[in-house]
Image (cartoon, grey):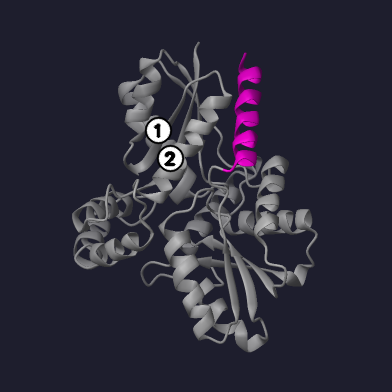
Amino acid sequence: MKKGVLLINLGSPDSTDVQDVKKYLREFLMDPLVLDTPYPVRKFIVEFAILPKRPAASAEAYKKIWWDEGSPLVIISKRLQQKLQEKLDVPVALGMRYQNPSIKTALQELYDKGVTDVLVIPLYPQYTMSSTETVVLKTNEIRKKFFKDMNLTFLNSFYNRPDYVKVLAERIKEQLPENFDKLLFSYHGIPERHDQKATEKAKKHPELNIKTYRDQCYETTELIRQELGLPGDNVFVSFQSRLGKDPWIKPYTDFVLKDFPAEGVKAIAVVAPAFVADCLETLEEIAMGYEELFMESGGENYKYLACLNDSNPWVEVLAKWIKGWESTEN
């Protein structure tokens, strides 16, 4: 069996054109693991409540962070793929859960090279239904339809792997300002009902050792805090990017940032450990929008700390995991 690797990230519109953004949002929001309502309800919400207005606003946000080469998320992911390929003897392909390059195109690329045994790495440190789970289901669906003789192995989460914790802690350390009151760990939020589903599943299947997304985020923070040697009161956890009126897991990052200055927290550093590559959410929402919010609320110093992206230490860690899989499978 010839081996290969498939990296999968979230995805991005093909351009900042409103129609491209609308196409991306439609695919993303119609995913039943993202907006987990019955199809008729989901269709109505997406087509009549979200898509008439949101694409134009999102397109403007994308324009603020768009690179000459294209989407930062896609470009960074491609650079990561290329650096990994230079360190490995097996083919490395890249796919996006939504839009391009597609998972099908990536699997076809590996298939054309004779690959039959694929390690799939969803580039999400923590596992939740709207990130890793939807990648697993979609990739398996495509394999069954088009690549029946392929064997897939999934690396489903890595937030608590010691080498990941170490490389992220080092990435944070090299960017930390000399003086700060708090290091804020701001994670991508999810609806409370998503975590409730994980809780119910954990009760039914204790042998699976299922943890809620919220618990994974707090564990990530604690592992990084220990690696950095920071006091407990120097770190804080929050969740950003709410959508709709349903309750999402708390505390909300924007609320936290508004309250911090009045509590004497005037200088903060912010990291986004739900992502390994910078994207719209980190570059526009966190690095721009939240800085403005914090400063308007009385803050004095705000610094966003970049993701792992295609940094060489992160490439080394991924290469190590892949080589470990190769040796185990042989």
Please tell me which residue is depicted at 66% across the width and 81% down the height of the picture: 265
x%, y% of residue 279?
44, 54
Identified at 65% across, 51% down, the residue is 171
Asked if the residue under mark 2 is in contact with the one under mark 1, i.e. CB atoms within 8 Å, the reply is yes
Q: Is 98 or 204 nearer to us in this picture?
A: 98
Name which quarter of the figure residue 143 lies in.
top left
Residue 7 visible:
yes
Which residue lies at the image location 66% right of the left edge and 54% below the top edge?
Answer: 220
Does residue 328 belong to the magenta stretch? yes
Q: Position of residue 176 (x, y in %)?
A: 67, 62
The tag on residue 204 is: none
Helix, strand or loop at mark 1 = helix
Dot 2 alpha-carbon crowd within 10 angstroms: few under 14, some 14 to 19, many 20 or more: many
Q: Residue at x 49, y 64 (%)?
A: 192
| Mark 1, other Cα within 10 Å: few <14 / some 14–19 / many ≥20 | many
Three-letter code, disc 1: Thr
Bounds of the magenta segment = 311-330
> Looking at the image, which residue sits at the far front?
68
Viewed as shown, does residue 106 lie left or right of 231?
left
Q: Could you say where residue 6 lies in the image, as x and y percent from the top left? A: 46, 30
Which quadrant would the C terminus be assigned to in this image? Answer: top right
On the image, numbered disc 1 is attached to which residue? 139
Asked if residue 80 is positioned above or below residue 301 in the image, the reply reads above
Up/down of 76 relative to 113, above or below = below
